[in-house]
């Protein structure tokens, strides 16, 4: 007896076109992090626990929250992640530690990271990031630790604000990075940096 | 077979015939009707097939045909019915199909691997009534020439890679009843001309990239039963004028778009509606009370919008509802006792709103309930004591993040079907329902952040599917049962901040999927079992604030994924294992407040990503501070105070450029 699939296709498709029940809630920080999950490839399942239907992301592995269930740390170093960072990361207003080092992340550093007003540590070293270092990062007054070394960043290095305290070790091994931006002079033509 | 020269009708469908279709069949010159569907037939050499001029009906569906479109079919010029669906045919559709088979009324190529563009010559099939090309790999635009095929009643192009606009010429198809263009890459706007297809009863455009608003002309489609526009980029408001004539509508699905404005009260005119899905849009304003007129409504999902106001009291009159999803809105007010009249209710989810008050007793009457979720609201009071007693199908229950108090209903899990039970973040007291032990489908459990007392030793049993459990921050007493070691799917086990006593069972070492183990801040005694070294996926181990004794087992060095290790505030003795230096993912190490002795291993300097903390304070460590610690360039907090360290502070520590806090006090340093 051939498998009785034949009946299904000779019926008109039934009333319900796509009755998938809605699966996410309005948790802004969870949605932001889930946008990251969708933008990366995760062969080791580091983000496997990142379930957007949960009440908040605070039980997700490698996410740390404070007492108000706001994300304070993201520890994804050495996770074999590839793909891109996402602008939604800028919504994590209480994020203090953004640790994405030693992955295969590509694309640009989103300028929205300049909205992370609580950020203390930004570690993006050892990835394949390209494009400029967003000048918006220099507005992060709490930023104490920055390491974007070992990428393929280009353009100039911001020198204003919090960037005044970072040494060249934070930027090394970016072959196309041109050096500190010159304040008060005519800007370099950074047309090549995309 | 080929000798049955007078045969006119041959039907062998739904058998187990296999092998290549014999070419001798094509010498049946008088055969008009041939149905070989539903077998396991394979592709023959079609060139051996002669033309079959009498053939009008050919069914080869649901077989194992592969390779190109069978060329011999192109010579069967009298074909009116052709069904090749559910095979593995590939390649392009030959143009001669359109030029030769002009008598075709029914063409079904669904679920094959045909590719390429749909030729504009499709319009040469001027007698076609049914065009079914779904689930193939067609690409390119839908040719506008389709608009001239005036006999078309059904067009199915779903699940392909068609691009470009929906042709406005479809508006010429006066006989069109069923149009399914779902799951393609169509963009631009919905053409207003579709409003001219007044015989349309089924219109499916979901899962495309359509944008813009809904043309008002669609209001003329008064015969619509089924309208599916979900998962696009559609925007604008849903006006009263648009929907007022859709009185035959049984299913309206516009979820996952950017529609805005109010839900028009005229929705109440759609009295035949069974499915109303408006979820994940930007609808605002109240849920109209006219919704009570939708007496056939079975599935209502308005979640993920900005709806405000109270849930209209009339909504509870919808006694045929199976599924009510209102979560993630700004709804206020209470849940009244009238919820009890929704006798068929299977799923109820109002999470993430501003609802308040107590849950009515009548929720215990919902005997068909699978899912009941009210998390993140301002509910208070006790859960009605009989909840669950008469609802044996309860699978998913969440009370989290409210101000509930009192005990959990004793027969909450009377059906033993629970998979998810989350009640964290309330003021629940008392003990856990006895039925939990026998809920063998439990997957996710959260009791954290309440005031549960009660003994956990036997509160749980063996739960093979349990993935996540958190009991943290209560006053649970009792012991950690070895049965936890049988919950082989566990990835997260958190019992911290309770009054649990006894030892850590070695059986926990069987939990090879465990990522997080938090037993801290309890009254645990005894040694750290060597078997914990088998937890190779563990990245967070916290046993701090207990009364653990003995040495740190060497097997701990197998936990190469460890990022956070906290054994502080115990009575551990022996050395700091030098194997700890192998943890190249360790971010934080706290062994403070123990009775550890011996030297600080120099290879702690190899913990090159150590960042948040290295705390060895309040022990009996001796010897010098290894200069290798200078390699910890990411470390922020270093505390070696209250030991017996001697010698000098190494100069190399000046390379620890991330250090924010250093404490070497209370040692014997020179």
Image (cartoon, rainbow, N blue to C red):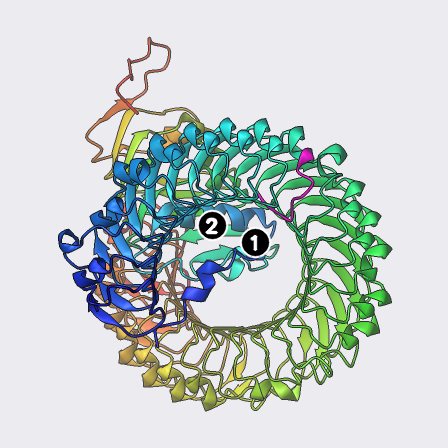
Residue on which disc 2 sits:
A34
Tell me the chain of label 2.
A
Assign a secondary structure to mark 1.
loop
Where residue B350 sits, quadrant-wise, is: bottom right
Q: Nearer the viewer, residue B524 or B58?
A: B58
Residue A116: image location, x then y, percent:
50, 38
Assess disc 1: are there few (<14), some (14-19) or many (≥20) residues with their C-alpha within 10 Å of its C-alpha. Answer: some
The quarter in which the C terminus of chain B is drawn is bottom left
**Residue B332 numbered mark, or none:** none
Q: Which of B71 and B190 is in front in this view?
A: B71
Label 1–label 2 contact, CB within 8 A: yes
**Residue B421 in the image: above or below residue A17:** below
Residue B619: image location, x then y, percent:
39, 73
Labels 1 and 2 positioned on one and the same chain = yes
Residue B139: image location, x then y, percent:
33, 38
Residue numbers of the magenta segment = B220-228
Residue occupying image coordinates x 52% and y 55%: A13
Mark 1 or mark 2: name the one nearer the start of the chain: 1
Q: Which residue is the extreme one toward the front?
A: B6
Assign a secondary structure to mark 2.
helix
Residue B266: image location, x then y, percent:
79, 41
Residue occupying image coordinates x 58% and y 28%: B193
Asked whether residue A95 is in view, the answer is no
């Amino acid at each position: 007896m051939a498998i009785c699939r034949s009946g299904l296709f000779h019926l008109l498709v039934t009333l319900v076109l796509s009755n998938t029940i809605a699966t996410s809630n309005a948790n802004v920080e969870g949605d932001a992090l889930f946008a990251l999950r969708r933008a990366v490839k995760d062969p080791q399942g580091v983000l496997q626990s990142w379930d957007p239907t949960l009440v908040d992301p605070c039980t997700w592995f490698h996410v740390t929250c404070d007492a108000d269930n706001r994300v304070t740390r993201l520890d994804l170093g050495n996770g074999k992640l590839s793909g891109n960072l996402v602008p939604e990361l800028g919504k994590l207003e209480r994020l203090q530690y953004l640790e994405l080092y030693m992955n295969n992340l590509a694309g640009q550093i989103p300028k929205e990271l300049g909205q992370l007003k609580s950020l203390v540590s930004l570690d993006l070293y050892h990835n394949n990031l390209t494009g400029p270092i967003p000048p918006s990062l220099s507005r992060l007054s709490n930023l104490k630790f920055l390491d974007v070394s070992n990428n393929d960043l280009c353009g100039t290095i911001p020198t204003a604000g919090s960037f005044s305290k970072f040494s060249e070790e934070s930027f090394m091994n970016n072959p196309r990075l041109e050096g500190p931006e010159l304040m008060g002079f005519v800007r370099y033509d950074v047309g090549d940096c995309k | 077979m080929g000798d049955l020269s007078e045969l006119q009708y041959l039907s062998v469908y739904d058998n187990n015939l296999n092998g290549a279709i014999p070419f001798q069949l094509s010498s049946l010159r008088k055969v008009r009707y041939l149905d070989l569907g539903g077998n396991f037939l394979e592709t023959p050499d079609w060139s051996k097939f002669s033309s079959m001029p009498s053939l009008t009906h050919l069914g080869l569906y649901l077989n194992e045909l592969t390779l190109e479109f069978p060329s011999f079919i192109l010579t069967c010029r009298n074909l009116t019915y052709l069904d090749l669906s559910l095979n593995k045919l590939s390649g392009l559709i030959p143009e001669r199909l359109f030029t030769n088979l002009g008598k075709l009324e029914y063409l079904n190529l669904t679920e094959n691997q045909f590719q390429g563009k749909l030729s504009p010559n499709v319009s040469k099939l001027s007698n076609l009534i049914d065009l079914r090309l779904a689930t193939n790999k067609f690409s390119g635009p839908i040719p506008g020439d389709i608009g001239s095929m005036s006999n078309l009643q059904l067009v199915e192009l779903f699940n392909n890679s068609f691009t470009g606009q929906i042709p406005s010429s479809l508006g010429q198809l006066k006989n069109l009843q069923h149009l399914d263009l779902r799951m393609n890459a169509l963009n631009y706007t919905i053409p207003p001309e579709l409003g001219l297809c007044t015989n349309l009863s089924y219109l499916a455009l979901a899962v495309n990239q359509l944008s813009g608003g809904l043309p008002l002309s669609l209001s003329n489609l008064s015969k619509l039963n089924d309208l599916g526009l979900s998962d696009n980029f559609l925007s604008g408001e849903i006006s009263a004028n648009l929907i007022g004539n859709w009185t035959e509508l049984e299913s309206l699905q516009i979820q996952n778009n950017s529609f805005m404005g109010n839900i028009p009260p005229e929705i109440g005119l759609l009295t035949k509606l069974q499915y109303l899905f408006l979820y994940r849009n930007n609808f605002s304003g109240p849920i109209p009370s006219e919704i009570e007129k939708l007496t056939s409504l079975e599935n209502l999902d308005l979640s993920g919008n900005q709806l405000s106001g109270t849930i209209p009291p009339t909504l509870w009159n919808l006694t045929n509802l199976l599924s009510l999803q209102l979560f993630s809105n700004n709804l206020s007010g209470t849940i009244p006792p009238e919820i009890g009249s929704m006798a068929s209710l299977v799923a109820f989810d109002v999470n993430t709103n501003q609802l308040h008050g107590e849950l009515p007793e009548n929720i215990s009457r919902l005997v068909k309930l699978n899912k009941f979720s009210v998390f993140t609201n301002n509910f208070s009071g006790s859960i009605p004591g009989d909840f669950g007693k008469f609802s044996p199908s309860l699978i998913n229950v969440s009370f989290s993040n409210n101000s509930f108090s009192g005990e959990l209903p004793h027969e909450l899990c009377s059906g033993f079907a629970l998979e998810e039970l989350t009640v964290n973040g309330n003021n629940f007291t008392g003990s856990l329902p006895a039925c939990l032990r026998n809920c063998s489908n439990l997957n996710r459990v959260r009791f954290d952040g309440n005031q549960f007392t009660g003994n956990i030793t036997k509160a749980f049993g063996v739960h093979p599917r349990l993935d996540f459990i958190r009991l943290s921050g209560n006053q649970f007493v009792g012991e950690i049962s070895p049965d936890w070691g049988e919950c082989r799917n566990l990835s997260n086990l958190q019992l911290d901040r309770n009054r649990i006593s006894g030892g850590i069972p070695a059986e926990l070492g069987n939990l090879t999927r465990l990522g997080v183990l938090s037993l801290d801040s309890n009254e645990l005694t005894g040694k750290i079992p060597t078997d914990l070294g088998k937890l190779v996926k563990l990245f967070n181990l916290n046993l701090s604030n207990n009364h653990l004794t003995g040495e740190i087992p060497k097997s701990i060095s197998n936990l190469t994924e460890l990022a956070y290790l906290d054994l502080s505030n115990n009575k551990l003795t022996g050395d700091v294992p030098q194997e700890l230096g192998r943890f190249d993912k360790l971010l934080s190490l706290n062994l403070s407040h123990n009775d550890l002795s011996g030297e600080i291993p120099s290879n702690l300097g190899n913990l090159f990503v150590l960042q948040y903390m290295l705390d060895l304070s309040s022990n009996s460590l001796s010897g010098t501070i290894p200069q290798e610690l200078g390699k910890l360039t990411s470390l922020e907090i270093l505390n070696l105070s209250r030991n017996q360290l001697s010698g000098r502070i190494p100069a190399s520590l000046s390379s620890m450029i991330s250090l924010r806090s250093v404490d070497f006090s209370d040692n014997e340093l020179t």
